[in-house]
């Protein structure tokens, strides 16, 4: 985070709060989020897209993807910075609403939405329900009919563009569960996406406000977005030719990547935004259609770099390797329960000793957790001072997205809380779970 500093004694502070004070008062492991940094990233993202859109004569909305990390405080920060909230479950939707976010500023996603999700979305007037399948057209129409409203919907399509990091998080190639393909599949040459667009237009209970595509996550190059943008514009133009209906908005989803390791470059958000928006404008010129309203759904790029996880070092073990070398296993008081991305995706992270300075020569370490499996790795390879010892504090960087939100209670280890730091003040925004919390769910 931008507010990270080192004192003369080598101790780190974040948001003006010393990590040793935090560890003493709130305990470890704990997720720390630099509120000003996260808000500044949100603001820059909104400005980047609205500026880029303004240059081609349209406007843009940025929806913060709550799956990256959502709490009521975070929802309020995002709305205060001029963003809206993208939700993908009853929990995310309810959290945004309970934060006081107006329904109109919320979007709802999901490939298998529950009745409870659709009912709440319609009852609270969410600004858009992103339809993800043909059966869902009927389901949303029925819920809207019962409520006596016209539901604003987008259709999520897949363009065949495949971008981003690990296979599990690359969502827009064809053989996966999300959205409807824009490529022809049936004998009449109509694509599943086009068929669903026609179905939506035939329902008076639905207002087709847009077309949506999300091509993947942790994307570091805008090319995939520009290809998807052109495909969406062409689909919109084809729908207008067939039906006379010109869809008002295109949503290019989220997926902008971040730097996880020291020395990695962060994508330039403003340049990214300009490339995507310019590709839309170009495709509109090519198809002779007006430039649509635009929207985007970044999560990781707003949340990840603003957060770190603070751990206390426990057991240290040197293991002899077959090649005669050693690996130092540095075990911390959390692990794959609060940090699953290394085990799940082979994601790379960086850890640092943050409670003191050390002049000891660095040694190659593996930071592991306290869970009962050998895949419980937080940082696979990292150089740490050779005098690292029990009681030292380690910080793992860029854990603000998909950290707390993907945490589990494996081994009945309670999940850490989240503390926001800002101008020397620490505020707990998500309380640490306790064993009593876990036992409260256990009915004996
Ligand atoms: N919009 C939609 C429809 C999405 O499916 C996603 C992410 C986003 C927006 C936000 O993408 P972002 O800007 O955060 O990349 N758990 C994985 C990431 C899964 C992303 C799924 N969808 C991870 O830890 O890398």
Image (cartoon, helix red, strand yellow):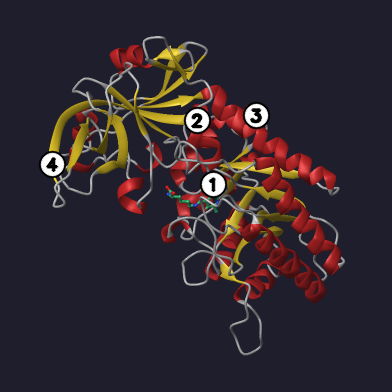
179 sits left or right of 392 in the view: right
The label shown at residue 321 is: none
For label 3, the residue is 81
Q: Under 8 Å from ligand 1: the CB of mark 2?
A: no
Per the rendering, the mark at residue 257 is: 1
Binning the other alpha carbons within 10 Å of mark 2 as few (below 14), some (14 to 19) or many (20 upward) gives: many
- The residue that mark 4 highlights is 319
Instruction: Give how far across and how far down residue 40 sits, in percent.
Output: 61, 28
Rounded to the nearest whole Å, what is the CA distance between mark 1 and mark 4? 35 Å
Q: CA distance from mark 3 to mark 4?
A: 49 Å
Q: Is residue 182 above or below residue 84?
A: below
Residue 248 can be seen in this image = no
- Identify residue for label 2: 306
Q: CA separation, marks 4 and 2?
A: 34 Å
Earlier-in-chain disc, 2 versus 1: 1
Q: Earlier in the sequence, mark 3 or mark 1?
A: 3
Q: Give the mark nearest the N terminus, 1 or 4.
A: 1
């Amino acid at each position: 985070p931008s507010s990270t500093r080192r004192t003369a004694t080598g101790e780190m502070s974040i948001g003006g709060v010393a990590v040793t004070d935090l560890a003493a008062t709130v305990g470890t492991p704990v997720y720390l989020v630099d509120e000003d940094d996260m808000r500044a990233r949100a603001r820059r993202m909104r400005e980047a897209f609205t500026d880029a859109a303004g240059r081609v004569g349209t406007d843009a909305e940025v929806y913060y993807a709550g799956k990256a990390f959502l709490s009521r405080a975070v929802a309020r920060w995002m709305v205060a910075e001029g963003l809206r909230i993208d939700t993908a479950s009853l929990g995310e939707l309810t959290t945004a609403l309970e934060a006081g976010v107006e329904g109109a500023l919320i979007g709802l996603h999901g490939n298998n939405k529950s009745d409870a999700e659709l009912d709440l979305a319609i009852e609270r007037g969410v600004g858009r329900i992103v339809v993800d399948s043909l059966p869902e057209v009927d389901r949303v129409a029925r819920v809207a009919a019962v409520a006596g409203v016209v539901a604003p919907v987008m259709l999520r399509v897949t363009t065949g563009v495949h971008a981003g990091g690990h296979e599990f998080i690359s969502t827009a190639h064809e053989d996966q569960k999300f959205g409807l393909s824009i490529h022809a599949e049936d004998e009449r040459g109509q694509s599943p996406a086009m068929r669903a667009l026609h179905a939506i237009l035939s329902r008076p209970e639905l207002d087709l406000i847009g077309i949506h595509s999300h091509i993947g996550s942790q994307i570091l190059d805008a090319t995939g977005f520009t290809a998807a943008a052109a495909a969406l514009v062409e689909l919109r133009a084809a729908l207008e030719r067939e039906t006379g209906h010109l869809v008002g908005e295109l949503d290019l989803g989220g997926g902008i990547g971040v730097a996880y390791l020291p020395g990695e470059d962060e994508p330039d958000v403003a340049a990214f935004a300009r490339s995507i928006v310019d590709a839309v404008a170009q495709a509109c010129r090519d198809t002779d259609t007006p430039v649509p309203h635009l929207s985007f759904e970044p999560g990781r790029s707003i949340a990840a770099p603003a957060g770190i996880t603070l751990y206390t070092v426990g057991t240290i073990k040197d293991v002899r390797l077959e090649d005669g070398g050693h690996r130092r296993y540095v075990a911390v008081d959390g692990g794959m329960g609060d940090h699953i991305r290394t085990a799940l995706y082979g994601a790379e992270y960086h850890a640092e000793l943050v409670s003191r300075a050390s002049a000891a020569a660095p040694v190659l370490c593996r930071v592991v957790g306290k869970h009962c499996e050998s895949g419980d790795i937080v940082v696979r390879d990292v150089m740490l001072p050779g005098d690292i010892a029990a009681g030292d504090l380690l910080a793992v960087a860029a854990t603000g997205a998909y950290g707390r939100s993907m945490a589990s209670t494996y081994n009945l280890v309670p999940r850490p809380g989240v503390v926001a730091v800002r101008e020397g003040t620490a505020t707990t925004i998500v309380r640490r779970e306790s064993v009593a919390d876990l036992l409260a769910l256990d009915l004996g």
